[in-house]
Each structure stands twice: as C-alpha cells, then as structure tokens.
Image (tube, coloured by chain):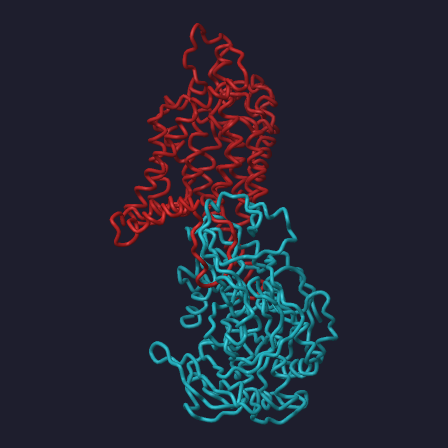
Chain colours: A cyan, B red
Amino acid sequence: MGKNVIIRKGYDIKLQGAAEKSVTDIPISDVIAVKPPDFPAVTPKLLVETGDEVLAGQPLFFDKNRPNLRIASPVSGEVAEVVRGEKRRIMEVRIIPDKGGMRYVEFPKDDPAALSREVIIERLLESGCWNYIRQRPYTLIANPEDTPKAIFVSCFDSAPLAPDLDFVKDFEPENLQAGIAVLAKLSADKVHLGLKPGQPEGDFPGTHVVNHHYFKGPHPSGNVGIQIHHIDPIRKGEAVWYVHLQDLLMIGRLFREGRYRADRLLALTGSCVTWPHYLRAITGQRMSDLVGGRLKSGHCRVIQGNVLTGKTSSAGDFLSFYENQITAIPEGDQPEFLGWLLPGFEKLSLSRTYFSWLFPSRTYDLDTNMHGEERAFVMTGQYDKVLPMNVYPVFLLKAILARDIERMEALGIYEIAEEDFALCEFVCTSKIDVQKIVAEGLEYIRLEG
Amino acid sequence: MKFLKNLVDSVKPHFSKGGKFEKFHPAFEALETFLFVPADTTKHGVHVRDAMDLKRTMVTVIIALIPTVLFGMWNVGYQHHLAYGMEVSVMDNFLFGLWKVLPIIVVSYAVGLGVEFAFAVIKGHPISEGYLVTGLLIPLTLPVSIPLWMVGLAAVFCTLLGKEIFGGTGMNFMNPALLARVFLFFAFPAYMSGDIWTDLSPEAGRAIVDAYSGATNLVTFDANHAHLQSALDMFWGFEQGSIGETSVAACLIGAFILIVSGVGSWQIMVSCFAGAWLMGAFLNLVAPSDLPTHAMHTPAYYHWLMGGFAFGAVYMATDPVSAAQTETGKWIYGLLIGAFTVVLRVFNPAYPEGVMLSILLMNVFAPLIDHIVVERHIKRRMRRVGGV
C-alpha cells in the first residue's frame, strides 16, 4: 500500500535554461573514460592492460575490498591509457572505441520474473550493472551479500533544472518494467517507488511487493533519502538499496536485450546553454563532445549534475558514471559595488531581504558568486525550513564537527546524505560548507562507527 | 565605481601577504568587502548561493531600527522642551534630539569598531558585521544625558567582554548590547537612574516647570499604577526613557520589517509579548484586593507599553546568537522572558527595567532550553525508528 506524503519544507530554485523535450544523439567520442573515483569506497584493481581489446560489458577493474564488484567498459575498443593521479591512484581508464560498430559481451535474454535472486545478482555483477544499485547510508554500491530491508526508486527528480524522468523513461517502458521486476526479486518483500502527483501508477507496473508512494512538495521531495525517511527510516546496522530511474532502464536492458548498453539521456541545462535540451550519450564520453559549441560565450562553469550537488567539470573531463544532467551557469567572478546594500530585484534569496520576493514566479539567471564571505554561524532556523526530515540539522552538524559518534547516531546520521543538505548550504547566511561537513561525518562514521 | 575599484585594487598588494601592511589585511578586507561584494565563487558543494549574507542581515536590522532612532531623536527634543514648558515645532524637537543623540551614536560606533578592528588585526581574523547593529543598539538603550566617556566605555566592554573574549560574533552567549547596558547600570548607578531621562541642559531665560518629574512610568507604576501616563501616550512613546525604547509604535514598525524579511524570529517576539501578558493577567488575578494601587493590579497589556519591553522583545531577545535556536526552544525562551520581565518589574522596584535583566538571564538559559528540546527530539526519534 502506498502513502501520500506532503512535503512542506524545501524550496524550488527556479533557474533559467530548463531542457526542452527534444533529443540530440551525440556521436561516440574518439576516446572515452571510465573513472574509478566515480565509485565511492572502491579501490580499483585493473583487469586489463593498455593495448587490450575489450567488449562493451567486459570488466575493466574490480574492487580490491569486494572483488565481486566489477566495473565494465561501456564501449568496445582498445584500452588506450590508464591515467594515474597522486600515489598512483587510478583516475581514468581510457578506451578508444571501435569505429565500425559496437561489439557486446552477450548475456542471456530472460524474463527476470522467471529467474532466481541468485542468478539475477550474478548476472548484474558479471555485467557491471550491479553498480547501479546503491545503498544508504553512505551512498555506496550495494553489498550483494546483504538483504536490504527495502529498495527505493525515486521516479522524479526535483532538483533545479533536473531532467524530466517521465520523458526519459517513456522511451523504454518495457525496460522499465523489466527493471522493476528485477528489483522485486532482489528485495525480500518491499520495493518502494516514489512518485509525484500526476504520475500514474500504471506507468510503473509491478507485482504486489511494489508500493507506489506519492510525494507532493518542493525540492528535495524527489531525493530518495527524503522518501526513505518518510516511508521506511534507516536504523543503525540497516541498509536500504536504491536505484536511479534511468539506471533502472539499464538494468532492464541487460535482461531484455542481453547487453550492457550504456547510452543514457542527459539534460543539458542552464542559462549558459544556447539550446537547453536532452542529449543521448554514452557514459564516459568526453565533455567537450557534449557541451562543445553548445554554450553561450562568456565565462561559464560547466557542472556535471545540478547546481546543488553537481561537480565542476571541464572540457577535457569525461562524463561520470551516474550522471543524468549537465548544467552550465555563468561564473560570478565580478565584484559588485555595494551589492549587499542594493534592493536586489534580480537576486534570489529565501529570506525576503531582497525585493525579488515580490515576484515569486520569476526564474533566475544565477551565477556562482558566493554573495558574501564565510562567517561564524549566526542565523538560526534557516536550515530547518529546507530540510523535510525529522532531524535537527544544526545540532547534527555540530555533533559531526565534534566527531561525537554517539550523538551523530542519536540525531539521525544514518538517514542523511549530502544531497539532502544541499539546500541548507544554499540558504546559509554564513556561507558554511554544509555538504562537506555532512560528507566528513558520514565518512568518519563509516570508518570508525 | 570603476575609479573606486581601481583605487582599491591599486593599494591591495600592500595589504596582501608579503605586503607592507600585511598585518592590517583584516581591516583592509573589511573596507574592501564593504564597498564591493567580493568576486569569490563557490568552490565545492553547491554552485549557487542565496544572495543573503551577514552584511545584508545586519543592514536589514539597521533599517528596522531606523523608526526607533528617528522617533527617539524627536522625543529627546520633545521631552526637553516639555520640561521647560516650551512649545516648538516637530522639526525643532527633532533637530534638538539629533544634536544630542548623534554624538552618542558616533562614539559608540567609533570606539566599538575600533576595538573590533584592533582585535581583527591582532588575531588575524576577518571582521564580522555584528557590531554594525550592536553599535546602534547601545545608544538606543541609554538615557540621553549619558556622558560620552561612558558610551565609549560601554562599547569597549561590549566588544571585549561581550564578544571577543568568546571568539567574536556568533560565539557570544549573551546579547552584547544588553551586556554593555547592564554593565553601565551596575557600574554607574548614579548616571543610570534618577532624573536622567530628559536632557535638562539650560534654556536661556527659562526654568524647569513645576509639573516636571524625572520619574519614568516604570518608577511611577510601582508606587501607584493609576498614576501612569495614558496607554496611548505610552504606545506612541510620548514618555521619558532610554533614547530608542519609548515608542512601541516604532518598535512594531521594526518588528514588521524584521518578520517580513525573515531576519527576526516572529516566534520569539510573539512569545515574549504573550509571556508578559499571561504573567500580567495572572498577577491581576492574585493581586491583593485591599491594596488597589499595588503594581500587581496594573492592566496586563500595560507591560507591553511601559519602558523598553517592546524594544527588548523586538530587537534584543531576537538576537539569533544568544537566543534559543530550536523552534520549540524559541517559544519557551520568549515566554519566559516576557513572564520574568513582569515579575521583576512588579516585585523588584530596585530594578525597574526588568526586560534587560530577564533577556540576559534567558540568554544564559537558552542553551539549557535547547538541550532539553533536543533531548526530547532524540527520545521521539528513538521511538519512531525503534531505537537506533
């Protein structure tokens, strides 16, 4: 049975440059890269060497600590280079793709409903598709030996300029259905789908273990962590698995097509983009092939992901494994004369200290300026307004800063992820790096707790 | 603007690392960021930031204080001329007040900011904007007859012992401006009570009228509450008192600005007023019926109008650093301030201005209130998730 959850706390940052529902197919780059740092807590051990021929779906490296986690090549071709960083850490495995069409590792085509849980897990691991299944707490790749207490899929993205997942999924309804069937097998008895009002349950069909919940309200209502919190909160020692909706399509493809096909839809968004729309590209494509020629002139920042949680990228960078969005916004590296004193009709603030609050439906062309300097924590109650969780954010952050594990646990560290606190960071008057503190806290408790 | 920017940029190297005046970098930075919102961009985490910063916050509070400043200046002139039985224009009253009040404000800012800059330079930390508000709050809580050296002393005490000793703005646990006032109140009682509330500088050929009394309503009501000025006079602020505290109307305009802008906590303001009224009403109920002039009989809502209650509730109790931080905590904190103010006023004539002391007392208790709220929150969490 599904629940109806009304999210009252939160905020939708209305930015200019939402993606138009139109798709450009991006030709495959002359070099693509798989980046081990995309996979948190994975220590890569290479399975291939420079010069090796690989097929799409063939593992490139595995995790030293959990050897059954393998990361596969998204394309067929020749391993061109292994790029290493500090302490010889592997940063990229670069592959020159085949010119004459993709060659795949062929897996059996099966109806997942007819397979056993063990077979499904084995096939997901073999193909590298397991990496799409992640767990909370800690936002890691799920541990195949665990039995999760539930599996969650958020079927909409509420982040600024986020891709419309309905648009994305409607290209492959059968693959979606197969993906949901896989999850139904993986979980002991609970799959939770988080929908927003207007999404018909029938679009996400599944067996009796599949529950449809509706979340109404502003961002972060689409964050899976918020949905988990309201449906089935995580206790110490428990793990909840989750899959992004687009990643679920990949899993569906594996079982229906027998291949690891790694192309996905990316929303190219932001006020610096000449024509914001969707791109179909393969994981690991070079960023210059995705955004080159598609940006307005001027000093822009290209972000993989959305403006709240994404990572700054550059032309020479490669598309990360879990990305569904690219955002380009102007760099705000110009000083502004008495900017803190002006009425500020064009400035966005959740407080009503700038007069832009008189125009609630306006969309904004925000840049990356800090709008002030970091200060000691002064204003109270700000974070609470944008965090729809039964958590006291400031006290939890203080517990993290004090490295007090007992207190972190009591205040709900297992339920949170960095992305859930992104809006707290956005609103912070004292310009504190909230997500960084959360990340440090989660890392600390993962290693020490 | 280009000219200013070029000027700032040209002297900047001297204040940067390795420059001649490297030590004074915090002072230079404060001036530079005052003129120009820096070009700093987001580095990690979110890529866009809310436009509000601490400067904007503080300037909003200053704007909210302007009604009390303007009215206070007028009232200084009005009370002065009233004491001499003179009828002058609104403008003349205001100009008289401006002439008397401006030096107090200037001294407060100059001395306080001087200490802040000195500390920033010595300790090498950036200058926080907190004093922009504190520097205006201090004069508004003082009687107009205050000697300027005492204003300076208060500013030093406030920045040193109110803030810097704890690590600067955001680290203090008591409201610095109130701490400055309470310091003067206890250190120099002769200057802080008695016939000090009206500027009685001589007027040529005039003598103080017989009807003049230096007693404020707070003193009057303890003797006989029936002798208070009318509620309307007290609401508008046609009464003696500290420079900025007399007009409830001006405070309400400020409260409106603070609440609409989201800078001040409406929970604290509402609960302060509620606490005072509830305690006042309770005292009315239990007041001795054989003593009809006893202060306990004062109508409950008079406590909103007398003295600096509204000023304290709107501008002082809401200081986010020293107030309770949790939502529930804010309600408790405000209610207790309101209630305690009335208790002090009614039962302790030695300290007529109860609101000052009760805010400071609750500042001290705010962490405890928050602690209790958070512990209850943890208990509820445990129940909900069935134990951690």
* Near-viewer residue (A379 or B53): B53
Answer with left or right where residue B72 lies relative to residue B152. Answer: right
Residue B338: image location, x then y, percent: 54, 35
* Near-viewer residue (B185 or B168): B168
Q: Quadrant of the C terminus of chain A?
A: bottom left
Residue B214: image location, x then y, percent: 46, 16
Residue A231: image location, x then y, percent: 63, 67
Compared to residue B170, the image places residue A115 above or below, namely below
Residue displayed at 52% across by 64% down: A297
Give the total of numbered labels. 0
Hey, which quadrant is residue A203 in on the image? bottom right
Hey, which quadrant is residue A183 in on the image? bottom right
* Near-viewer residue (A371 or B139): A371
Compared to residue A440, the image places residue A71 above or below, namely below
Residue B9: image location, x then y, percent: 36, 49
* Near-viewer residue (B323 or A332): A332
Q: Quadrant of the N terminus of chain A?
A: bottom right
Residue displayed at 47% across by 35% down: B358
Q: Residue furthest top?
A: B205
Compared to residue A368, the image places residue B327 above or below, namely above
